[in-house]
Amino acid sequence: MTNEMTDYPMIMRAAVTRDWNDIRIEQVPVPQLEPGEVLVRVGACGICGTDLKIVAGVYKGSWPPSLPFIQGHEWAGTVAVLGEGVSDLQVGDRVAAENHKGCGACANCRRGRYNLCEVARTQGKAYKLYGHSAQGAFAEYAARPAGLLHKLPDSVSFEEGTIVNQGALGLHAVRRCRIEPGDTVVVIGPGLVGLITVQLAKAVGATRVIVAGRGPRLDLARELGADEVVDSTSADTAEAVRALTDGRGADCAFECAGAPSAVVAAINCVKRGGRVAIVGLTGNKTVELNTDRLALDEVDVFGVRSSPNAYPELISLIAAGKVNARRLVSRVYPLEQINAAFEAFRRREGGAIRMVIKV
């Protein structure tokens, strides 16, 4: 290791998932660095909807492969120690961390699609999904390959840095769906990814953004740039969108709700030749689709997974004020109150968008 701290820490505090729905604050060993890795002092880590499912055991045996386990995959911090061979970072650098590490050798990784690493399904050692199948960042320190760390400017706080992970997912979706200047865009599901996608759509040239959802999040969607909103509890989303577009339909739709009905609505609300990005996960629930409509109207449907090659651009958009990440941080909790934070997020207290753990 190079540029080491005077005393390499040996023990750290961490929120350890000991059993399903059982998170405890414990003293655990600080991870030791492998060549090419960096030890980062965690500044803040966000709680994702996936974290709620992981702790409940929804993906047991896979995410995580075994217990005990440290969750947390949306985070930022300060470089503390450089491992062997690391030359593009310095101690003291402020960084945000990706969570997908591809094998680097398969055909997809070599094309830059490391989010679709071909060895991921085998859970081989060459592939890691930090916070899911490999140890996460609800802790004082985390070790990561240097290539997964992206510098944060001083103007972007660690709390805002926790938004980068999901923001980059939204950016990947926008790229896949090919928003063009002047497009009308529909976002279904005004959660974190949906609200970021609203802002990104405007940043890349959409002139009209319609958001479908429910509750106080619709007000926040307007605040962040939505031109119209549709209350999905009182109106059919596709019918409402067609009414707002003189029967034509939208150019692009982003399904960010993770519900079968939202997938159907997204496909039905775009024009002939429209594009649909499927960003949410239904949890393997069955979705009934009219495939004749997909064929006869040539509707393009894009799956969206993770955020390959999107972190630097998303960070620059936050720094430039094009994406308001600060407004999406609902509440900040100390590490010792992580269970209260999980529960508040589970209940969507005050329309919570993202709860953040300050370490």
Image (cartoon, rainbow, N blue to C red):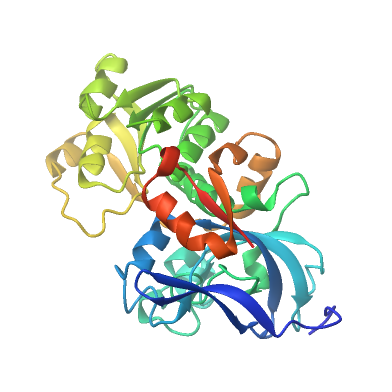
Q: Residue at x 70, y 41 (%)?
A: 319
Is residue 30 depicted above or below 152 in this figure? below
Residue 155 position in % (x across, y down): 76, 44
Q: Residue furthest top?
A: 246
Q: Residue at x 44, y 46 (%)?
A: 173
Residue 262 position in % (x across, y down): 25, 40
When asked about the image quadrant of residue 190, the answer is top left
Residue 294 position in % (x across, y down): 20, 40
Is any atom of residue 150 visible in this view?
Answer: no
Image quadrant occupied by the C terminus:
bottom right
Image quadrant occupied by the N terminus:
bottom right
Is residue 174 depicted above or below 164 in this figure? above
Q: Residue at x 41, y 33 (%)?
A: 217
Decide which of 287, 4 is in the foreground and name it: 4
When asked about the image quadrant of residue 268, the answer is top left
Q: Residue at x 56, y 44 (%)?
A: 329
